[in-house]
Image (cartoon, helix red, strand yellow):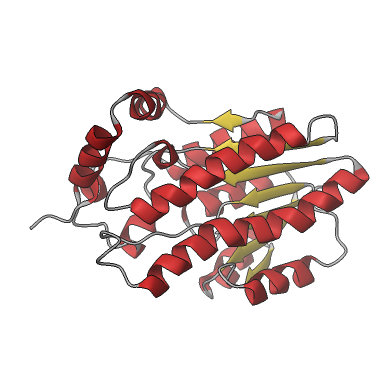
């Protein structure tokens, strides 16, 4: 039986990934830093782990819970953000974004990937973002962490060629999840705009992962937005980002 592990699985894209895994007949471990993960896991008849990947202790809890079981499908999806400029945010808040999005992802990817390589099989999906292409003012730290994840995933996948292990980077655009409320983005242009369906995004990511693709950006709109951000002058992109992410007066 295939074993799938999904982080950030209590809601949004992660929960939809978990639902797909169950529908595909996979054994499933669901992880989140909220106690609601136990309710979500119970509904899917999966194993739920309440742990915070922003900390080394939380990652150790996750790895201890997995134990000696071999993970076939690893969805590193957990992430967080916060509205505001760098100067408005407290250092503790900035550190938490970096620790969750970057350190937590790498702390889990490193040992589990090694085990996949040792047995010669496994698939990893890392949730990046089209924000990783942007000078994302008012989401400066978040955009920087997603730039790291976008490049980390593709480079890691290249390093693992011919090992039997693949890495896929899912780079969605704005998706209808609780992310925006948690980040304090409800009263922003992006918070109020129509967003992508998380079930569609999760399905695109799952299918790309199974196919062994290096990258996937769902929808033509998001592909065009990501491509435009790479060729437009960075200060212009930063200004557009401010319009989208700055709370309305």
Q: Which residue reaches farthest left?
A: 249
- Residue in front for this viewpoint, 247 or 197: 247
Residue at the image point whose x is 61% and y is 73% from the top: 50
In the rendered image, the vertical position of residue 20 relative to residue 12, given as above or below: above
Q: Please say if 140 is above or below 60.
A: above
Q: Residue at x 70, y 44 (%)?
A: 124
Q: Is residue 139 left or right of residue 151?
A: left
x and y, in percent, of residue 242 in the image:
21, 46
Residue visible at 54% across and 52% down in the picture: 14
Q: Is residue 69 above or below residue 132?
A: below
Left-right relation of 87 to 58: left
Closer to us: 99 or 199: 99
Residue 108: % across, % down: 69, 59
In the rendered image, residue 196, in percent from the top left (x then y), is placed at 38, 38
Quarter of the picture containing the C terminus is bottom left
Left or right of 226 in this view: 214: right
Say whether residue 174 is left or right of residue 22. left
Q: Do we see residue 178 in this rendering?
A: no
**Numbered circles on residues, count:** 0
> Which quarter of the picture shows residue 178?
bottom left
Of residues 21 and 216, the one drawn nearer to the viewer in this rendering:
216
Q: Where is residue 86 in the image (x, y as percent from the top left)?
A: 30, 61
Residue 77 makes an appearance in the image: yes
Residue 28 lies, with reference to residue 166, above or below; the image says below
């Amino acid at each position: 039986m295939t074993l799938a592990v999904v982080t950030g699985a209590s809601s949004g894209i992660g929960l939809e990934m978990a639902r797909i895994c169950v529908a595909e007949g996979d054994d499933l471990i669901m992880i989140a830093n909220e106690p609601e993960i136990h309710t979500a896991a119970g509904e899917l008849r999966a194993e739920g782990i309440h742990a915070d990947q922003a900390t080394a202790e939380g990652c150790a809890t996750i790895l201890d819970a997995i134990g000696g079981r071999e993970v076939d499908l690893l969805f590193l999806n957990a992430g967080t953000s916060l509205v505001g400029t760098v100067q408005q945010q407290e250092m503790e808040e900035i550190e938490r974004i970096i620790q969750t999005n970057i350190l937590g992802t790498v702390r889990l990817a490193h040992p589990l990937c090694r085990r996949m390589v040792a047995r010669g099989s496994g698939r990893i999906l890392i949730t990046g973002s089209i924000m990783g292409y942007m000078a994302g003012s008012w989401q400066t730290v978040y955009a920087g962490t997603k730039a790291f994840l976008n490049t980390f995933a593709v480079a890691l996948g290249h390093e693992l060629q011919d090992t039997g292990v693949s890495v896929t980077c899912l780079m969605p655009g704005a998706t209808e999840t609780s992310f925006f409320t948690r980040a304090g983005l409800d009263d922003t242009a992006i918070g109020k705009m129509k967003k992508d369906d998380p079930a569609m995004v999760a399905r695109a990511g799952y299918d790309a992962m199974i196919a062994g693709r290096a990258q996937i950006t769902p929808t033509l709109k998001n592909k065009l937005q990501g491509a435009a951000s790479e060729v437009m002058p960075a200060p212009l992109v930063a200004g557009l980002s401010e319009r989208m992410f700055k709370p309305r007066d």
